[in-house]
Amino acid sequence: MPNLNFVLPHWLYWGGLLVFPLIAMYLVRQQREHGPAQEPAYFTAYLFWLTSGFAGIHRFYLKSLWAFAFIPIFLGIIYCSAQVRDVHEGVSRTYAALDQARTTLDQAKADLNDAQSAGRATATEQSAVDDAQPVLKQAEADYQAAEAIEQLWRGRARNLGLLLLAMLIADAFLMPRRIKQLRAAGETAAPPVTTPPVPEIQIGTGEDPTLGLHARFTDAIEWVNVHVGEYVAYWAVISVFVYYYEVVARFVFNSPTNWVHESMFLMYGMQYMLAGAYAYREDQHVRVDVLYVKFSPRGKAIADIVSSVFFVIFTLTLLWTGGRFALDAISVDEHSFTEWGIQYWPVKLMIPIGAALIVLQGVSRLIKDILFVIRKET
């Protein structure tokens, strides 16, 4: 199988982080408004075709026996690729022996020339040359044999891969017809059994006494943080596809990437910063609540007002230092020192932005705590 030399372009990485959540949010909104798509769905079928069609998963989804034609071809590619990995070790070993034999012969010839120039050539130098020549020929033969075996397995994997690609291309045009057949058959079948609604899962600890309190200013802040948190939450879906690509590229195509791990831990670092305010709004941050849970709702609000002093110190420090880090990175157009060389300044820019969102959410929380205490007193 030919190696995958794809390296994720920087523009595609940043563009994907910006656009993918918008597409995901649109699809989720459509499903909420119109209900689940008619099964089988075109989107689901082509998603399986794109991500796991090489194993015939899209055909299993479409309830087609044609799916079993993909499995032996895919297993054959994996086997041939494994043989390439094993044989490649022999190629590297024989190439090292060939290089050593060439070096030995060149050194023996140099010694013989030096001896002849000095007028003191002996049988020892000539014998060294004579001994090195057959060793070099044998090393060349071993290397060529090992390389031929590697090319044989690579050719087999390549042919199977081309066959699999042709099958996938053909399926891209055949799938709509199969989907229409299944939908037509489903319309004449018995109606599906309805399932009871899933109970709503409580988010957060439920200890915040102001969760149900609303004010115009605080609602505006929380609207921003809720939408930012929802936006970056969809980044986690990106990692599923990216790590899936890494596994396939590594174990099927013998092409481990140099960008997957770095791109994902940077993405999750930015997600961690931007989602902090949303987690604070939903009362999901870790807290030492040995005493806090024993307070009354009014006591909890008062405790939150007192502890807000420490909150402000930490978050404003984070905002100030994070802003300096981001400005320094922007001024020098900072990039990573890895082969991928991704820009670091957008990542560091998320530190002050996330800190600013947390500060705003802290202000909202403080206002609500004060309103809660005042209303309880009145």
Image (cartoon, grey):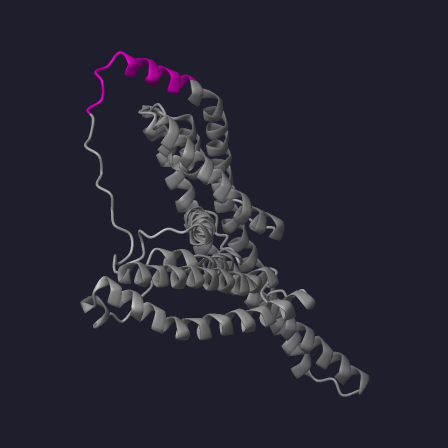
What is the x, y in percent for residue 216?
44, 50
In the rendered view, tell whether residue 319 sits above or below residue 238: below
* In front of the other: 262 or 220: 220
Q: Is residue 3 visible?
A: no
The residue shown at (37%, 41%) is: 75
Dominant secondary structure, magenta: helix
Residue 372, quarter of the rendered image: bottom left
Lateral position of residue 266 relative to residue 191, left or right: right
Q: Is residue 185 magenta?
A: yes
Count of numbered badges drawn on the protein: 0
Q: Is residue 116 magenta?
A: no
Residue 330, quarter of the rendered image: bottom right
What is the x, y in percent for residue 210?
31, 57
| Magenta segment | 177-193
* In front of the other: 133 or 249: 249
* In front of the other: 341 or 257: 341
What is the x, y in percent for residue 99?
61, 68
* In front of the other: 214 or 18: 214
What is the x, y in percent for residue 73?
40, 36
The residue shown at (55%, 72%) is: 320
In the rendered view, tell whether residue 147 sits above or below residue 189: below
